[in-house]
Image: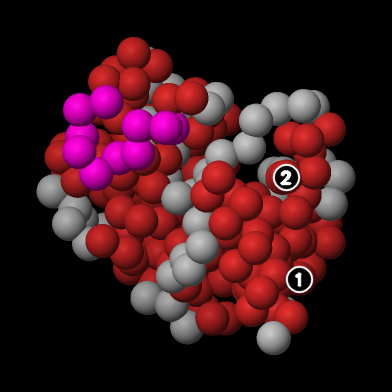
Amino acid sequence: MDLNDALEQVRPYLKQERFDHTKRVVDTAVKLAQIYRADLYQTEIAAAFHDLAKYWPKEEMKQIIQTVSYLPKDLLDYHHELWHGPAGAYLVKQKYGIEDQEILDAIRYHTTGRAHMGKLEKIVFLADYIEPGRNFPGVHEVREMAWKDLDKACQMSLHNTIEFLMSKEATIYPDTFYAYNHFTKILSS
């Protein structure tokens, strides 16, 4: 499967604006992959499929999380917006036979992050956050940092996300805290 095939597989599941976002995430992820010497094929496929389950029915995503043994059940205690990453990774494996664990992890953790993310995970996580269509407080600073320091940019985006969710008195999935703490530790050592 190449990038065009992947995008054509994803297109029917996304609204036009989300599909446009996906194409911008692919472009941004590829630029980051070129800078940080990540595998371009893996980057294109992970970025193309990252939002496959974005509009999947909530009940079906819930069922996937409940029945797939390796998916954490505590996800269901948090906002359903977080479900599409893990559910999407599962669907990509089942529907398209993609077995590459780095691609699946990049899709799975693109909304929450996690401690010890691999290079591809960081790239897709950041590309989703900074693609040129994004416009919210702090994104410009993270966008600039992304071209200089991948880990610092991830820490900054996690900080912004945690701060935003706290300001709304929303719950925060533990993986997001673990990711922030991980980057803070490695950047201060």
For the N terminus, the image quarter is bottom left
Tag 1 residue: 145
Above/below status of 10 relative to 186:
above
Residue 133 point in image, percent of width and height:
70, 44
Residue 93 point in image, percent of width and height:
19, 46
Residue 74 counted in the magenta span: yes
Left or right of 23? Residue 167 is right
> How far apart, in angstroms, are the residues tagged by discs 1 and 2?
18 Å
Amino acid type, residue under disc 2 in the picture: Ile
Q: In the figure, residue 150 lies in which quadrant?
A: bottom right
Q: Residue at x 50, y 33 (%)?
A: 82
Amino acid type, residue under disc 1 in the picture: Met
Q: Residue at x 70, y 27 (%)?
A: 170
Q: Nearer the viewer, residue 75 or 156?
A: 75
Mark 2 surroundings: few (<14), some (14-19) or many (≥20) residues within 10 A? some
Q: Residue at x 79, y 27 (%)?
A: 168
Q: How is the image coloured?
A: secondary structure
The number of numbered discs placed on residues in the rendered structure image is 2
Q: In the figure, residue 43 lies in which quadrant?
A: bottom left
Q: What's drawn in magenta, residue-wise?
A: 66-75
Left or right of 5? Residue 74 is right
Q: Nearer the viewer, residue 140 or 67?
A: 67
Tell me the number on the disc at residue 162. Answer: 2
